[in-house]
Every structure is written in structure tokens, then in C-alpha cells.
Amino acid sequence: MSKDPVPETPSQPHASLVLDQRDANEQLLLAALRAHDAAEEAHSSRIFAQGESQALRRQADELLATAAFRERLLGIIGHDLRNPLNTMVVAAQLLESKGDLKAQDVWLATRIVESGRRMERMIDQLANFTRARLGGGFMLDCRPCDLAGICRDVIEELKLTTGVEITLTTVGALDGNWDADRLAEVFSNLIGNATGHAAPGTAVRVTLRAEEPGVVADVSNEGLTIPLDALGVIFSAFARGQASARAESGHLGLGLYISREMALAHGGELEVQSADGSTTFSLRLPKSSR
Amino acid sequence: MCPRWRATHSFPLTSREEARPQAIHPRRVLVVEDNRDAAELLRLALTPGGHDTKVTHSAAEALALLAEFQPEVAFLDIAMPGMDGIELARALRGMPALAECRIVAITGCHFPAQRAPSPPLFDMHLVKPLDIRQLQRIVLSLDHCRSDS
């Protein structure tokens, strides 16, 4: 069989077929290269995405760890410390009230109770500080209440433990929607501080007045002027000076920090002025906290 | 510093003077507290009033006791393993025989959100460390509560 002579005319298409084939190969190769690149790209972006999601996960873990840490710490402060303290204080109270103890033994039992109460105040402060500092914040339980009533109760309680005179002046309507317990803590702190720093023979003055858009409470005492550098950090945590004074008073140097945080949580403010031997803390509160 | 006794609800407590026992009226008191020291101290604190005080260490124990003992006031620790004080209070509130019972929560924390739910579940909340005079006053003031309602 003789081969058919290669026809003239089809040589063009044949050549072009070869060319096409080459072209196609090339295209294919390019496509494969592109696919490879794309795959590379996809791979690396997946790696990147993995990295990103790992970073996000890490952040989430850290947040969770903080929250878990906070709750754990609050658990320790709330229950683990309070249970033995409860045993101590209640047992000492029972001793105190037994009736057949020598005067000196009653005195000893009372020391245990008093110290327990001081420790309780420190635990309260630590718990509040943990809430304020580690997030979560103060959960306010706001209800209609009267600032004068809150203040009067606090003053009555403080009068049991201080010989310093405390005067209360009220002007205008002092009702609002606040967390009465929290504000009682703020006043207890401010007025307690004021009686602690009042010059002998002077009175602590508490003035409550209605002032748009809410109320203003001033707590003033006569005594040493607070130096400027101390004023600047007076609301910082652990700002208060001598460790001995702290231990003695049952305060951790957190009172003013916590008081200010509580004022802020209410949408209010707490400020201080000290000049010419007179110091005044001013608490401003809107009528209704948010 | 904070006010020592913060009742979240106005449990009609008498003043110290009124509460001073003229003639002691013994009451049926239930204490549910898993911390054994704390439970025993509560019993001792209420003994001078001559109250019939039953102490249990878990909600289950308390529920078992209720068939034969209907307290007039119950002190419930909130944080207890198993059924906690809040669940137990709900169970007590569901019992017609205890319709008159005053329920007092005892907690280890003073944050509003962690306080036990307010009335009608609990008539009052106490925060540890407790004050025994406060406990005694609560039991003594039951008469006044009754006449109020």
C-alpha cells in the first residue's frame, strides 16, 4: 500500500494543528502553573487564616482566662475567705455574750470580733476592686431612693464608732434612681475618711443639694491641706500612704478608687478640692443613672 | 466600709429596744448550712431564745425533715453542693404547710447580681460574717411580722 502523498493544501492545517497543539500545551502548562500558583496562594492564605484564627482564638482564650480568673478570685474573696471569717466572728460573739466571762475575757473576745469586722471591710474592698479592675464592672441595682435617707443611715452608723461631730444639711429634692447600697458605701467611705482626718474639735459637714441635672453631695472636713502631688493620685488604687495606717484602719487604700468607680458607674463624678486646711469631696449624680 | 446589715427587702425588723425579750416565745427554726461549724454556731446563737432549732447540712436532709417539722423561720445557706439554697427556697415556697414561713438567705457575697433572688423567694438576706444579735432579732420579730400581714 502506498501512502497517500501528503496533499499540499492540508499542510497548512496540519502545521497549524501542530502549532495549535504546541499552543495548547503551552496554555495548559501556563494554566497548570497558574493553578499551582493559585494553590500556593490558597495554601498560604489558609496558613495565614489559620494564623489569624489562632491569634483570635488566643485572644478569646485570654479573655476567658481573665473572666475565669476574676470569677475564681471573687469566689475566693466571697466564699473561701468569708466562711472561716464567719466562724471566727460568730464564735467570738457567742463567747462575748456568754455572761459568765471575766471582764478581760470579754475584752479579748471583742478584739476578735472587731478585727474580724475590719477584715470584712477589707474583703468588701478587695471584691469591689476585683470587679472594677478586672472587668465585669459593678452591677448596679437602681431603684427610686432618697439620698438624704441613705446619708442619714450612714451617719447614724458612723456615729457609733467616731467621736467626731457630723452635720447634715439638705437643700431641695434629693430623690433619684440609684443603687442605694452602693451609694451608702460611697458615703460611708467619704464621711469615714473625713472623720478620720478632721482636726480635733471640728465637725464634718455633709451637704446635699439638688442641682441640675441631678444632685451634688459635698463632704468637708477641716484639717491638713492635701498636698498637690497627693491630690493628683488620690483616686488611684492603693494610693493611700503608710501601710501602718492602712492596717490600723482596716482599709486597703482602695476606698476612694472604688467610690469614684461607683460614682462613674452611676453616670456621675467624684472630685476633690483641698485648700487652706479644708478638704471637700464632691459627688455629682444624675437623677437617673442611664 | 459599708453598712453591715443590708436587707434587700424591708423585713419588718423591730428596733433593738422592741426586740429585747419580754417573754420569750420559742419558735421552730430551721438551719440549712453545709459548713458544719457555721451550722453549729447558728444553733448555739439561737439556743438562748429557747427556740426549737433543727440543723441540717444539705437541702435533701432539710426536705426529709419537713414531714415532721414545719419551721416558722428558715435560714438557708445559698452556696451548697447539690441542691442549693435558692432551689431549696423554691421548694419550700411551693409547700402550703410553710406558707407562713419566713425564709432568710445567708450568702458569702454582697454583689447585687450574686445575691439570692429577692422576694417573694427570700424575706431577707444576710451576708457572712453574721451578727448573732441580728439572728436573734429576726426570730424574735416574727410576732411583729404576723401582725403586719
Image (cartoon, rainbow, N blue to C red):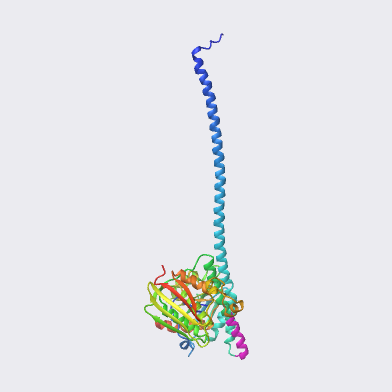
Q: Residue at x 51, y 23 (%)?
A: A20
**Residue A282, image quadrant:** bottom left
Quadrant (top left, top right, bottom left, bottom right) of the N terminus of chain A: top right
- A98 or A44: which is nearer to us? A44
**Foreground of the two, A242 or B52:** A242
Q: Is residue A213 left or right of residue A93?
A: left
Q: Position of residue A134 (x, y in %)?
A: 54, 65
Task: Identify the main secondary structure in magenta.
Answer: helix
Q: Position of residue B112 (x, y in %)?
A: 48, 71
Residue range (magenta)? A100-115
The spot of residue B54 in percent (x, y) is: 54, 79
- Give the percent coordinates (x, y) of residue B11: 44, 79
Q: Residue at x 54, y 79 (%)?
A: B130
Q: Is residue A105 on the magenta stretch?
A: yes
- Image: A10 above or below B46: above
Magenta stretch containing residue B31, yes or no?
no
Q: Residue at x 56, y 57 (%)?
A: A61
Residue A20 vs residue A286: left or right? Answer: right
Q: Is residue A69 visible?
A: yes
Q: Is residue B139 visible to the viewer in this orientation of the structure? A: no
Residue reaching furthest to the front:
A276
Between A21 and A141, the one nearer to me in the picture: A21
